[in-house]
Every structure is written in structure tokens, then in C-alpha cells.
């Protein structure tokens, strides 16, 4: 479990990273939708985004992922006086995605990492990623991977700053495959 206790960051607002709970699902769905539209709305079709959100962020699917003991699903909450604990971002890491090809992928993957657009560029994504990496290290994963859309240049820059490198032989269609070794 990561983190064992909420991790708090001293900002103007108090930000906490905690393990996702079933009661977070409506906020996860809203945050995912806002993040997806802001991130991909300029180059993916509306029907694709709507279909993906309906599948990947359904209540049933999120509940299964939140309760999956083989992965770590964390949320970032802002506890200032105005919002009373709003969910502003989330991330999930765990065993690698099943692939039909025999590409030499890492044993674990970053399944998702999203922040509401207003909260991006403040170091919160790096902090959340660090918490997920702590969970991966505790499970002795030596390396992990992440997928990023070929047109998502802000995410490509973010992952490069975090120490990821592209492994083109593992790319899937329009998704780049990135890897990052985890120091013990």
C-alpha cells in the first residue's frame, strides 16, 4: 500500500496523496473527463474520447482497479477552505499491460497519471509519480514503462524530465513506449 499514511505537501492549499477509495469514483470520472478533453481534444475525435472514457472510467472498471491488490491507485486531494477535499489528480501503477506481440517491455507500467489542467506545472505530477515509484520499488520492480500519445508533447517533456527514455521497438500504433529504471 502506498502511501501508508497520507503524504502531505505544504502549499497554499494542503495537498494530500492517498489511496483511492470507492467513494472517489465520481470525482475520478469527472477529473478523467476534464483531463482527457484538455489533453486530447485537439487531436482525438470526440467519439473516441467519449467511448474511451465510458469504457476505461466506468464505475465497474474503476472499482475493480481501485480494489486490485496487484496495483497502486492513488489520488491527489486539495483541502483548502473553498473545495473541502476536491480530487485534482490521480495515478495508477502495477504489472505491465498484456501485449499480443513479444515486445521486450518492462514488468510494470504506469497505467495512468492525470491532473486537472489548472494544477499542472506545479510539481504535483512529479510528486505523485514519486509516490507510485515508491510502491513499485517496494515490490522490487527494477524498471517500469509508460505509454504516451505521439502528439502529447507536454507529457513527453514531463516524462523526459522524470528520467524516462523512449523504447521505439515497443511503441504501439500512435502510443510511444517509455521506460524508467528504478534505483533501489
Image (cartoon, rainbow, N blue to C red):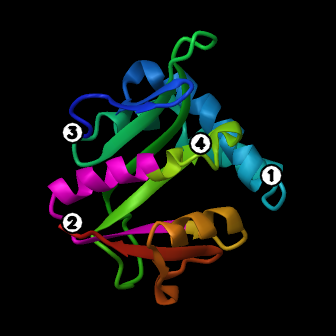
Real-space Cα separation, disc 1 to disc 3, in angstroms: 34 Å
Residue 17 vertical position relative to residue 79 in the rendered view, above or below: below
Real-space Cα separation, disc 4 to disc 3, in angstroms: 21 Å
In the picture, measured across the screen, residue 55 lies left or right of residue 144, that is right
Real-space Cα separation, disc 4 to disc 1, in angstroms: 15 Å
Name which of mark 1 and mark 2 comes first in the sequence: 1
Secondary structure at numbered mark 3: loop
In the picture, measured across the screen, residue 35 lies left or right of residue 6, that is right
Q: Is residue 169 visible?
A: yes
Residue 23 vertical position relative to residue 150 in the rendered view, above or below: above
Disc 3 target residue: 1
Disc 1 target residue: 41
Disc 2 target residue: 141
Question: Counting other residues with Cα less than 10 Å from the Cα at mark 1, is it few (<14), some (14-19), or many (20 or more)?
Answer: few
Residues shaded magenta: 127-147
Q: Can you give x and y, in whole percent of width and height, for residue 143 in the image?
A: 29, 72
The quadrant of the rendering that contains the N terminus is top left
Name which of mark 1 and mark 3 comes first in the sequence: 3
Disc 4 target residue: 115
Name which of mark 4 and mark 3 comes first in the sequence: 3
Q: Is residue 152 visible?
A: no
Q: Nearer the viewer, residue 71 or 79?
A: 79
Pair 4/1: label in front: 4
Task: Identify the residue at horizontal 31%, vertical 44% (top origin).
Answer: 72
Amino acid at each position: 500500500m502506498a502511501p501508508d499514511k497520507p503524504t502531505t505537501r505544504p502549499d497554499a492549499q494542503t495537498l494530500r496523496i492517498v489511496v483511492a477509495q470507492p467513494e472517489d469514483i465520481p470525482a475520478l470520472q469527472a477529473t478523467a473527463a476534464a483531463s482527457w478533453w484538455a489533453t486530447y481534444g485537439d487531436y482525438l475525435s470526440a467519439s473516441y474520447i467519449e467511448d474511451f472514457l465510458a469504457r476505461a472510467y466506468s464505475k465497474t472498471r474503476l472499482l475493480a482497479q481501485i480494489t486490485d491488490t496487484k496495483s497502486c491507485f492513488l489520488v491527489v486531494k486539495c483541502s483548502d477552505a473553498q473545495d473541502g477535499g476536491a480530487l485534482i489528480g490521480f495515478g495508477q501503477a502495477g504489472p505491465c499491460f498484456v501485449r499480443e506481440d513479444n515486445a521486450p517491455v518492462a514488468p510494470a507500467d504506469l497505467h495512468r497519471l492525470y491532473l486537472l489542467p489548472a494544477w499542472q506545472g506545479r510539481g504535483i505530477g512529479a510528486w505523485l509519480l514519486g509516490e507510485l515509484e515508491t510502491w513499485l520499488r517496494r515490490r522490487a520492480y527494477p524498471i517500469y514503462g509508460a505509454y504516451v500519445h505521439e502528439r502529447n508533447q507536454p507529457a513527453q517533456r514531463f516524462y523526459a524530465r522524470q528520467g524516462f527514455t523512449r523504447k521505439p521497438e515497443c511503441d504501439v500504433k500512435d502510443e510511444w513506449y517509455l521506460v524508467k529504471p528504478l534505483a533501489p
